[in-house]
Image (cartoon, grey):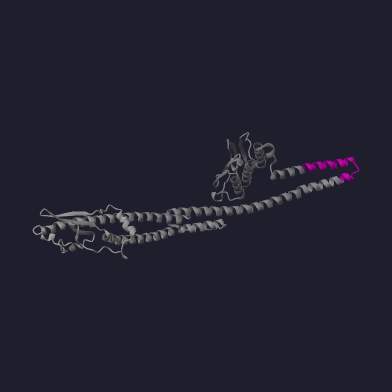
Amino acid sequence: MSLQLKLNLMITCMLLVLLTISTFFVVKNSREDVRAEISSSSNLVLHLLDDEMLHYLSDYAWINSGDSISNFRLQSLDNMRHLKIDFYDTNGRLREINHKAKLLADANAPPAWFVKLIYTSDISMQKKTKKIILNGHYIGAIVITPDPSYEIAEVWKDTVSILGLLAIFFVMINVLVYWAVQYTFKPVDRIVDALTKMQHGDFNSRLPHFRQTELHEIGRKFNAMADTLQESLQSNCRLTQQVIRLQEDERKSLAHDIHDEIGQYLTAIHMDASAILKSRKLSSAKESALAISTVTGKMMEVVHQILQRLRPRVLDELGLELALIELVNHSRQRCKNVKIVHNIDKNLGVLDEQVSITAYRVIQECLTNIAKHANAGLVSINVKQDEQFIHLYIEDDGVGFPPVISGQGFGLAGMRERIQGLLGEIHIQSANNRGVKVTVKLRKNVLEVVA
């Protein structure tokens, strides 16, 4: 069930509760009206009869007559529809009534359930009997019986009108609420459409400016997320292209080294070996063998350099601490005009293989960038550790670069991607002519966190 439908149902239920409560109070007021009308009519009739009886105080010879003449003029009270007034003589004979007609069932008559509902109230349906005594003689009794039929019919007409207005109000409110809820949730459809487009790879989708405060904040956050995803996608595309280009450059470089270096050495070995085979003098054979030995040593150095570029063997053999020290010493030999100061904690402990390689590559990339671009005179390298993390601090006093291009180069972008892939953190601070400071935080055991 959608939220829009839930809200409509909730509001409809609340309106139904209000309608029920209103109906209850309407019925309650109707009961009170019927009771008050009948009670007041009964009291009025009793007062009228008391006044009428004064007419007969001087003459009551008519009492023993057997005619049916209206003596109390009860028919003059036929407008008292809420009461049935009967006069009985001393013999119990009905001598006079106010009216004979009762409310007949017709199209305007109230339904039985409404009559029953009204009758359940505290309306007194007991008859009232007034004994008639004139000059000390009992001449009969007048019986007043409540008859609320007419009043209930009138109340029913009023109740139908009120309930009709309530029903119209109920329908109109429901229509307005449905329209208001639909209008309010209309932006949700746009949000769903934008999310669907983004799900299918359309990161150009954006949300408009919503007037509602909550939806405006959602739209702003959505657009910011879409911008971030689009930038990340573009960055990943650039990074992928640069990785492919770098792989091709590396392969070309390796092919060049193998062809130029190892190929030449193999050619020299082949020539010296042929000379040994053709030589008839031991001295000539020794010279060729010595040349082969020299060339083989140079080949071993070239192969070692190639393997070092592919993967630092010292990292597997000696661990991260000694591998970093060797990397720093090698950088000192290549950049003799740069002073490199290092402080590396001993016993870095057991690290995940990817963490060790990443830490090594980060410092290697930083030293390479410093040698190529920084024009620095002092480089500081610090490697610290605690129970869970290893911290790298690389800082130089070179020319730096503007913050706008921070992280856009392949080396920095590659480091960032590699570190974030290991759930680490990297911060690069730089400004023109103020050097560069790289801070890296790596978790020692990434596999435990991922698992």
Q: Position of residue 259 (x, y in %)?
A: 76, 50
Image check: 368 left or right of 229?
Answer: right
Q: Is residue 162 magenta?
A: no
Q: Position of residue 420 (x, y in %)?
A: 58, 46
Rendering quarter of residue 77: bottom left
Magenta residues, as a range?
275-298
Q: Count all numbered tags in the image, as a single digit.
A: 0
Would residue 177 be visible to someone looking at this image? yes
Q: Position of residue 228 (x, y in %)?
A: 54, 52
Q: Position of residue 444 (x, y in %)?
A: 60, 39
Image check: 200 left or right of 103?
Answer: right
Say which of 404 and 112 sits in front: 112
Residue 221 vertical position relative to residue 316 in the rendered view, above or below = below
In the orientation shown, which residue stands out farthest toward the bottom?
107
Quarter the C terminus occupies: top right
Residue 350 vertical position relative to residue 158 in the rendered view, above or below = above
- Residue shown at 47% from the left, 53% from the top: 218
Would residue 207 be visible to someone looking at this image? no
Rendering quarter of residue 364: top right
